Image (spheres, rainbow, N blue to C red):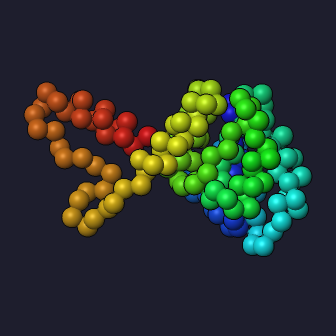
Amino acid sequence: MIGLLIIAHAPLADAMLICARHIYGSVPLNCVTLDIPSKAEPADYLEQAKTLHASVDTGAGVLVLTDMFGATPTNIATRLSRPGRTAVLTGINLPMLLRALTYRASVPLEVLVEKASSGATTGVIRASANALQNQRNPPTSPENSNDDANTRLHDQQ
């Protein structure tokens, strides 16, 4: 299973894991966080990041998720990056994290990066009070109902 390390501005990293625990009912295995306080220097947290990285690296690789490109958490994370072993993905949101957690036991690291990245972008939707949230219009005919249900299920993952 690919390990996950979330490095973000405090308290976002811990909050993301709390959200995952809320959804899944327990803390996901091989998933740890590092919250970086404001005005922190990357060098001050690099050793802690390396220790956490090692704690989730079971040999399948590690995906490091950060909040914002160019910021201190990402600057720390990029020092952990190793092609084919550790990937860094910025712009964490809950759909990205849930995709990473869902697929990390069944796909290689590079595919997981694509799945998580796709989850992040497809999870950003303009919502309105007029439309049902996370749903499509009902099927137009009974023979299409299974196809439509499968599409909705796929869209939610």
Q: Furthest residue to the front? A: 70
Residue 141 placed where, x, y %?
A: 10, 34
> Do we see residue 7 in this rendering?
no
Quadrant the N terminus occupies:
top right
Residue 128 visible (yes or no): yes
The residue under the point 64% across, 63% down is: 12
Up-down relation of residue 43 to residue 96 (above or below): below
Q: Is 30 displayed left or right of 114 in the figure?
A: right
Give the quarter of the image for residue 19. Answer: bottom right
Q: Quadrant of the C terminus?
A: top left
Residue lying at the far left of the rendered structure: 141
Decide if residue 47 is on the left or right side of residue 37: right
Residue pictured at 71% horizontal, 29% vertical: 84
Q: Residue furthest bottom?
A: 39
Q: Is residue 149 above or below residue 33?
A: above
The quarter of the picture where residue 133 lies is: bottom left
